[in-house]
Structure formats: C-alpha cells, structure tokens
Image (cartoon, rainbow, N blue to C red):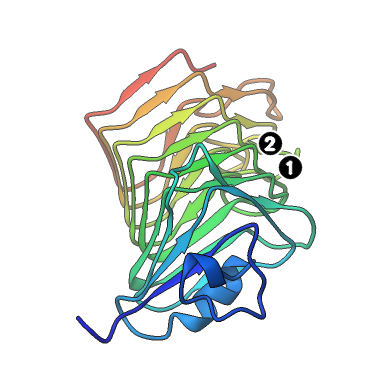
C-alpha cells in the first residue's frame, strides 16, 4: 500500500524532528505512534533504552517494531501509575522489544498481536497479571519471566492473566505470586499463568513459584485454570 508510511524513533532523535527517516528520527515511541495515522503504518524503534512515565497506547492497525530485537530495544517504566503498553486494535502489532520494570503490570492486551517480545521484571499489586493481562488478541513467541505479584491478599497471575485470546509458543518462566490464597475469587493464584478463558498452547511454564497463600500452600504455581484451554504445554519444576 503506497499510502502507508514508516516512522522512525531513536535514542539520538528529537521529537521536534519529522520522524520520516533515521536521520530525522523522533526521540519517543509515543510520538512515532501519534504520527502513524494510516492502517498499515510502521514505527521502527532503534536499539537502545527508552524510559517512559506514561502508558504507550496502540489503538490503530499499525506495527511497532524494535529493529534490533528485544535483547537490544528496551522500553522501561521510570514513573507513573500505569502499565507500559496497551494494545486495543485487531490489527495492532508490537514486535521485538523488551518491556520491563512496571509496577502495576507490564502490558494490557485487549486486541492485536504481541510477538517476539521479552516481558520481564514487572510487578503488580491489586491488578491482573504482573507481566501481562490478556483480554483478547494473541501473544506469540514471547518470553514472560521474572514478573511478580506483590499484594498479599489479591494477586492473580504472576506472569500471565489469560481471560480471552491466545498465548502461544511462549516461555513463561521464573514468575512469582505472593498473594493470599484463592479464597473463591482466583486471588493469589497462578504464578506462571492463571487461565480464565482463551487458549494457552505450546508453551513452556517452568520455574514459577507461589510463595505464600492464606493456608500456607501455593495455588497453581505453574498454571491455575478455571476456564479456557491449556493444550500441549510443558509445565515443570514449579513450586
């Protein structure tokens, strides 16, 4: 589609630039997304660390991609009381970035696709999913690790809270819950993932830990399932 465009973001850019080339790149991902107004537009994010104190919303059919892949393109929360990314369009794509250090959960996926991303080192209190809350769309080929729930009375899904949609071919490893037990409401359950609906498929769920519940036992250290489908997953060495 000749009408679609590419927009460029770099740690050496500035938001007063045009964003039309690497030489005139923006500094912030939010500014690149704001200019990507046509379905099919792409926002190319150069290697580097991008600090954000605001939610980065993707609410149109665009693709945001870290060109160096997740090991070198890092989006890090440095303040504010929101997740790092929210995707809410069926054709939205987030690809090739690391999402880390949020304190109210890393990502909220309502629609769209998240692929080849690292969702790591995020925490949450009284919200769903320390790493990611999936309400729709697809998470594929991602690493979701070292996320945790911090609230001792209410903490579902240390790594993943799956309500609807699909989590496929992901490594869900070394996540933790410290919640206060199931209590009939699904709180403090599912250190790796809590599955309320949707499909968890072809994933590795390994090394996750439920550290505390009201009765002294962990509820679903690997996976706690109350609905949906868990299919063809390896679930091992959780405690």
Q: Is 233 situated above or below 92?
A: above
Label 2: how many residues lie within 10 Å, few (<14), some (14-19) or many (20+)? many
Give the camera-side residue of 131 and 211.
Answer: 131
Point 52% across, 75% down: residue: 19
Q: Position of residue 52 (x, y in %)?
A: 70, 60
Q: Which quadrant holds the C terminus?
A: top right
Which residue position is annotated with label 1?
A: 153
Residue lying at the far front in this picture: please name it.
23
Work out how far the residue at label 1 is from the one at label 2, CA to CA, in angstroms: 5 Å
Q: Position of residue 95 (x, y in %)?
A: 40, 53
Point 55% across, 29% down: residue: 219
Q: Which quadrant holds the N terminus?
A: bottom left
Could you say whether the residue bearing mark 2 is in a helix, strand or loop?
loop
Point 57% across, 66% down: residue: 29
Q: Position of residue 234 (x, y in %)?
A: 31, 22
Whether label 1 touches label 2, CB < 8 Å: yes
Q: Is 61 situated above or below 207?
A: below
Q: Position of residue 67 (x, y in %)?
A: 42, 51
Going from N to C along the chain, the mark reached first, 1 or 2, is 1
**Which numbered disc covers residue 220?**
none
Which residue position is annotated with label 2?
A: 179
Point 62% across, 21% down: residue: 217
């Amino acid at each position: 589609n000749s009408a679609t465009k590419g927009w460029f973001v770099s740690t050496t850019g500035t938001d007063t630039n045009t964003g039309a080339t690497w030489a005139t790149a923006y500094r912030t991902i939010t500014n690149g997304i704001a200019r990507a107004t046509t379905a099919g537009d792409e926002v190319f994010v150069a290697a580097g660390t991008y600090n954000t104190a605001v939610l980065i919303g993707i609410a149109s059919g665009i693709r945001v991609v870290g060109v160096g892949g997740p090991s070198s393109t890092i989006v890090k929360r440095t303040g504010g009381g929101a997740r790092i990314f929210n995707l809410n369009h069926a054709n939205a794509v987030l690809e090739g970035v690391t999402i880390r250090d949020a304190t109210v959960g890393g990502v909220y996926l309502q629609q769209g696709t998240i692929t080849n991303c690292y969702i790591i080192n995020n925490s949450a209190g009284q919200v769903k999913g320390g790493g990611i809350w999936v309400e729709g769309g697809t998470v594929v080929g991602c690493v979701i690790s070292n996320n945790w729930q911090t609230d001792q009375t209410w903490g579902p899904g240390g790594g993943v809270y799956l309500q609807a949609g699909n989590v496929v071919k992901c490594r869900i490893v070394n996540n933790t819950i410290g919640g206060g037990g199931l209590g009939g409401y699904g709180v403090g359950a599912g250190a790796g993932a809590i599955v309320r609906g949707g499909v968890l498929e072809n994933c590795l769920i390994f090394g996750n830990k439920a550290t505390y519940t009201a009765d002294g036992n962990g509820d679903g250290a690997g996976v706690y399932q109350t609905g949906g489908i868990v299919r063809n997953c390896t679930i091992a060495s959780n405690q």
